[in-house]
Image (cartoon, coloured by chain):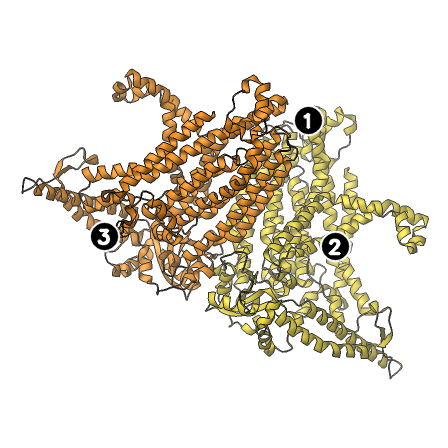
Chain colours: A orange, B yellow
């Protein structure tokens, strides 16, 4: 890629970005769009415009993002949001510190050499090289003493990374400790989750068994237990009840609206009872819903009792009357046989994956093994099933299977396009479905909480992204070929290929630029949610409830966001010395990312649950992994350049590993469990144990009023011997 | 080795064994030898002959060993002794069950084939093979269908091993749980060890810091703390004081004896004050010792105070008022920064290695890394320094360095012997010093207790023994050569070499037989301790105290015993199918070993400390490791036999790994820490906390009377700000 085409591509992206930012500035001032651009403060009952202060200037959002403190972010988006910002600023810091030394040092050293010119003179086919490529390591001649500077560059980047990561880990560890020793009592801090309750010896119920066991081992601190029950049936009834309630409210609003118009008697809305409301007999919606609700309420009541008494599972939540007691209990082995009474800290009540709780230990391990195998195969061989499906979904086959598509497909222009792009379309569909597939796989492992499943899915996505995009493009493209030619030893080809790795740098430069300009522009302007919200509001929503659902911004979605950022980290680190020009682009990516993310955290996204920065050790480990990939790549690249001192780079790999072990020793465990010191933080108020208990009652089993919590526990306790027959 | 020489060697060993057993039977009946053959009951104040019941029959000891229950063994030798017996009987069980099927099945299959006869006919040089070798797999022709039987044999041995190991692990886990939930309170169950106390913030003493920290985190269960102090100086004074006390008692006994003889005034003993009592001025021993004692007592008192107040170290023992509280505290993370306030279960007071307690975490890790490297180099390259030393310690060099040896060395006969055997002598000295070296290295790692250091040393010794003896003899001798010839593909040599591995079996058969007959004979008859005891008693001992020291039997020494047994396990397992005749020999080794060890546990050895079977997981893991070595060896051997179904054996390796993970998941953690369930066992008496605290006061700092425990703690507490200046 030559300079002009790079500038064109870069310029286009930049223009798109500027346009999107202008759109954002214009649209976000309109009060009617407030629900799209300020859902977070609105959901907390705050006025998003605070007396118009926010609307004054087009760069107001930038000023606000800079002035908001970490405490503001935590208040708006929780510790997880703050930790994500720390992640972005950490990488930014690494890139800025690296660039400050590398750019002024390495660019002139590379630019004043002339390996490319010599190569193009000797070899007619390699005549094309751009000005950008002249500023990269590819322009340095093999065996040159100038390579020392690049080698020292790798050391500099490594040292900067160690230093900044250490500071960040410490900072995040303190953030987590502060959150965990919060003066406001939170339910998850008083609760542990126990799984694998062993078989019953006598005819006592699981609830009694759990109670007596924990009361004996924690006589002074045990408060209560809640046995997990099979709530599938109850949940089904509850959901259908809620559905009818919503439908009723909608129908009543439609009816009221129709009355307000020309006809005072109004038009009673009707519906069909069959599949998706498309088939079946036509009924009056309001009457139908009322009937259904009347029918379902007692059914739910009955099912709740059955669930609580007869469907007790071998897992329970245990509540303690102090945080220290819960923290200690969550990290101690309770049973002599370790595969029974396994304990862990209870997740945020909102994040519990109920159906997984009762899964037995060995089942979880078997599933984990299977899931890991599936993921490994998916990452490495995902092209095979896609090629396979592509081969079968030829147009001819499609026509045979879905005759109604025949007319569409037989138009000649469309046919050409489809025939050309069908495999790519399938690939795109696969990539779009991948995050959901990985989340599904992670949950199948039997993980207890959404936040943990999210981390597991993010890990899998990271491997996929790095393996396929980075390894796929770079290593397979050049290094493999280079190795092959090394084996045959023709000097000319080696030096030619050694210069093609920096060539790839230009590709990644464009990739990074496109990604941040267009990606962040779309993210900030929220064009898609804006359009969807306005369409829904205009045509579908009738009740307040429905409008609220229409603007609900949802979670930030770390599961795909973090691995994508990690890909950029890996790319930028790996090319930081080969083509130092990538550093400013990386810095802009993470700087702009930090700015946009902070804005979105403060104004838009509402977290579904809180894991108190549990994600950080994963980010940390993966940055180190990227660093090690970088160090090894550089060693290989130096070898290609026939630099005899290249093995000095290999010293860095054990140093990185030792660094990783030291940080793990020092920080990790306080992320896995809560240290007593942290749990012993002073509470501002006496914890309301009733409320803590009630927080964990699943929606579909929740009694109407809080006093009924007693009833809830009673129902579980009276299961007695009947439960044993299950 | 042919049949006759094997029988000769076997017969000789057997005769030696019978003679030693007869000697044992004869000598152990004499009451004057009771201290050598029954020190364990005597030390407990029991009459070893219990009304002559034990002396009646020469096989009385065998009957007694069979009739004694596990509880008897635990009462006499502790849980560790019982676990060692379980280890022996587990291996015995594996061998018996394996043999029951393998011997009748495989011996005829091997014996009726005739690969060796054919080989000796085709190849003149390979003409020697014994009858024993005909009963081994070497006699089966390559590619033969008979090899299926041997392959199934490997499966059978593996399944038997899995089954018996599972049962044993469960049994030992229960043994440990019973010991840990002992109704009699033991000091180590109420105590935890905390290391890496962080730097002081203000000018409080370490004692105050520790107290306030643990009182805050365990307000209801914290009893007291004891800060570890630097007691090197106090220990030195204490030891020299004790030395003078002993010398005084000895001198007084000598003086009294001399009086009873002809001269009524007696002869006052004298001594020299210089090095080893060999040089210096002559003084009256009784007066000199009295003077020294008078001088040292106040010196010790002063040093005790200094040690307690001014030499406080960054480690402490924390006492809790309940076992559950201590068990929970020992397995919870206390500090947010994991490299501070690290906790672990307190070791048996007798097993504490005081100087190691105050070593910092990173120092321990660095030392561990260094020790591992040293051990790795020792295991793999130990021959190099020995060859080096041998080269330098030629006779000529010796004569030059130690001229007084000249006369000895110049005798022609001696010279010949020395010149021939000097390298071997150095090797023997090295091997004799190795256990002590490994123990020293293990302690240098900063391990907190003798029992842990013992396990670490045993592990190192195991690697050494297996690597050098087993791998050295078998694999390097035959498999390496075989691989070389495979590369060159001459069929004749391959089949010749494939039959040489079973040839090694005969060597190991003799090795095992010699080991158990001579080794166990010597162990049982205790000839060396007997002679030493009688010599000491006659010529050296004057006081009761000295006689007691002379017969003290010491510890059983698991650190070298277990790895040596493990070597036999590895050998017998690996040859179990190749040469099934080794199985009965292995069975005799472990059967006889069980018998002799049980006798020695009940009557002789007195354990220095108790680790409640903490050793078992190591034994378990190493048996599995031996099994995996076996499975891989068999795969290689089947390949040599050109058996195309050999890869079926590789299935066993992942199965063994999974089995090992499952057992670890299920059992291991309750060996690493104490499960709450176990610690919650009922106590028969209210624990005397003062006594528990006093049990951990080091001898050299111990106050004279128990009431002074208060004073001891006071002394620590009054260190105040002075301590910070250190």
Considering only vertical position in the picture, is B548 above or below B160? below
**Which label was assigned to residue A301?**
3
* Earlier-in-chain disc, 2 versus 1: 1
Pair 2/3: label in front? 3
- For label 2, the SS is helix
Disc 2 and disc 3 on one polypeptide chain? no
Chain to which mark 2 belongs: B
Identify residue for label 2. B521
Q: Secondary structure at mark 1?
A: helix
On screen, residue B112 versus residue B70, left or right, reads: right
Provide the residue designation for mark 1: B487
State whether residue B627 appears in this view.
Answer: yes
In this rendered view, identify the residue nearer to me: B54 or B480. B480
Q: Position of residue A419 (x, y in %)?
A: 35, 19
Task: Name the chain under label 1.
Answer: B
Residue B286 in the image: above or below residue B623? below
Q: Is residue B274 left or right of residue A644?
A: right
Q: CA distance from mark 2 to mark 3?
A: 78 Å
């Amino acid at each position: 890629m030559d300079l002009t085409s790079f500038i064109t591509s870069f310029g286009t992206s930049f223009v798109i970005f500027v346009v999107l930012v202008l759109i954002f500035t214009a649209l976000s001032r309109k009060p009617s769009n407030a629900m799209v651009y300020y859902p977070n403060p609105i959901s907390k009952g705050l006025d998003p415009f605070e007396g118009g202060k926010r609307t004054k200037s087009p760069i107001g959002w930038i000023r606000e993002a800079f002035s908001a403190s970490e405490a503001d972010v935590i208040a708006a988006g929780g510790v997880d949001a703050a930790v994500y910002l720390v992640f972005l600023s950490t990488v930014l810091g690494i890139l800025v510190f690296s660039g400050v030394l590398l750019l002024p040092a390495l660019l002139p050293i590379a630019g004043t050499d002339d390996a490319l010119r010599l190569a193009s003179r000797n070899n007619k086919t390699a005549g094309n090289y751009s000005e950008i490529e002249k500023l990269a390591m590819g322009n340095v001649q093999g065996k040159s003493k100038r390579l020392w500077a690049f080698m020292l560059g790798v050391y500099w980047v490594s040292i900067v990374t160690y230093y900044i990561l250490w500071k960040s880990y410490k900072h995040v560890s303190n953030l987590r400790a502060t959150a965990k020793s919060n003066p406001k009592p939170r339910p998850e801090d008083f609760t542990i989750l126990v799984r694998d309750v062993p078989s019953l010896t006598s005819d006592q119920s699981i609830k009694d068994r759990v109670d007596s066991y924990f009361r004996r081992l924690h006589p002074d601190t045990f408060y209560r237990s809640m046995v997990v029950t099979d709530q599938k049936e109850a949940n089904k009834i509850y959901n259908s009840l809620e559905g009818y309630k919503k439908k009723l409210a909608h129908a009543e609003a439609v009816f009221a609206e129709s009355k307000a118009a020309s006809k005072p008697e109004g038009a009673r809305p009707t519906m069909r009872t069959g599949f998706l409301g498309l088939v079946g007999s036509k009924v009056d919606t309001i009457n139908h819903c009322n009937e259904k609700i009347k029918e379902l309420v007692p059914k739910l009541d009955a099912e709740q009792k059955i669930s609580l008494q007869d469907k007790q599972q071998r897992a329970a939540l245990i509540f303690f009357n102090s945080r220290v007691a819960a923290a200690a209990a969550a990290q101690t082995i309770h049973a002599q046989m370790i595969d029974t009474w396994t304990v862990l800290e209870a997740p945020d009540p909102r994040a519990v994956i109920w159906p997984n709780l009762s899964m037995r230990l060995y089942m979880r391990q078997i599933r984990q093994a299977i899931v890991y195998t599936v993921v490994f195969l998916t990452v490495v061989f995902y092209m095979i099933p896609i090629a396979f499906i592509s081969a079968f979904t030829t147009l001819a086959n499609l026509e045979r299977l879905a005759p109604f598509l025949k007319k569409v497909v037989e138009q000649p222009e469309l046919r050409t396009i489809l025939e050309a792009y069908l495999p790519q379309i399938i690939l795109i569909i696969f990539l779009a479905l991948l995050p959901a597939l990985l989340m599904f796989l992670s949950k199948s492992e039997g993980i207890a909480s959404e936040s943990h499943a999210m981390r597991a899915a993010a890990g899998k996505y990271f491997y996929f992204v790095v393996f396929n995009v980075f390894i796929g493009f770079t290593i397979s493209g050049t290094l493999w070929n280079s190795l092959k030619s090394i084996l045959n030893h023709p000097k000319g080809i080696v030096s030619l290929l050694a210069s093609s790795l920096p060539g790839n740098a230009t590709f990644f430069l464009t990739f990074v630029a496109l990604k941040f300009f267009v990606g962040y522009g779309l993210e900030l302007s929220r064009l898609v949610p804006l359009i969807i919200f306005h369409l829904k509001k205009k045509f579908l929503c009738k009740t307040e409830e429905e409008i609220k659902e229409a603007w609900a911004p949802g979670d930030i979605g770390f599961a795909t966001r973090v691995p994508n950022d990690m890909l950029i980290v890996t790319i930028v680190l790996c090319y930081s010395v080969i083509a130092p020009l990538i550093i400013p682009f990386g810095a802009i990516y993470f700087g702009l990312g930090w700015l946009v993310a902070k804005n979105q955290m403060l104004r838009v996204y509402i977290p579904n649950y809180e894991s108190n920065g549990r994600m950080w050790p994963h980010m940390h480990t993966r940055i180190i992994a990227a660093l090690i990939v970088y160090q090894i790549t550089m060693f290989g690249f130096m070898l290609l350049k026939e630099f005899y001192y290249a093995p000095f780079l290999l010293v860095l790999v054990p140093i990185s590993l030792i660094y990783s072990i030291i940080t793990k020793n020092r920080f990790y465990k306080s992320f896995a469990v809560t240290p007593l010191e942290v749990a012993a933080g002073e509470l501002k108020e006496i914890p309301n144990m009733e409320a803590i208990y009630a927080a964990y009652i699943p929606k579909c089993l929740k009694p109407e009023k809080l006093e009924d919590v007693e009833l809830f526990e009673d129902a579980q306790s009276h299961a007695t011997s009947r439960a044993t027959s299950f």
